[in-house]
Amino acid sequence: MKTNVGGLDRAVRVAGGLALMVLAALDVIGVWGWLGVIPLLAGLFRYCPLYSLLGISSCSGSCKR
């Protein structure tokens, strides 16, 4: 699995995913907030399957494997 999620993209995904999951846990936005696990995992693993399909990478030269 090739890394395709860069530093800023990674931070936004992790923060956004955590925020959605917290809001879902507090029953502010309902069960759809648990979909925040998707960007959270993409940020943690630095890999986005959709980016691979579209040939996109937000990763600079230092984070490529």
Image: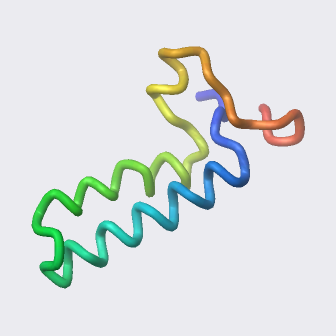
The reply, left or right, for residue 41 in relation to residue 38 is right
Give the camera-side residue of 65 and 38.
Answer: 38
Residue placed furthest toward the right: 62
Q: Residue 33's x, y, as percent?
A: 22, 62
Q: Nearer the viewer, residue 28 or 38?
A: 28
- 37 relative position to 54: left or right: left
Residue 10 x/y as whole percent: 61, 53
**59 relative to 28, above or below:** above
Q: Residue furthest bottom?
A: 26
Q: Which residue occupies 25% across, 53% down?
A: 35
Q: Position of residue 22 (x, y in %)?
A: 30, 77
Q: Examine the rendered structure and indicate whether residue 31 appears above or below residue 57.
A: below
Task: Give the image quarter of residue 46.
Answer: top right
Q: Is residue 6 above or below residue 33?
A: above
Residue furthest front as drawn = 29
Quadrant in which the N terminus is drawn: top right
* Image quadrant where residue 50 sits: top left
The image's colour scheme reads rainbow
Q: Residue at x 46, y 28 (%)?
A: 49
Q: Nearer the viewer, residue 28 or 36?
A: 28
Residue drawn at x 51%, y 61% as measured from the top left:
14
Q: Is residue 21 left or right of residue 40?
A: left
Q: How many marks?
A: 0
- Quadrant of the rendering where the C terminus is positioned: top right
Q: Residue at x 43, y 50 (%)?
A: 39
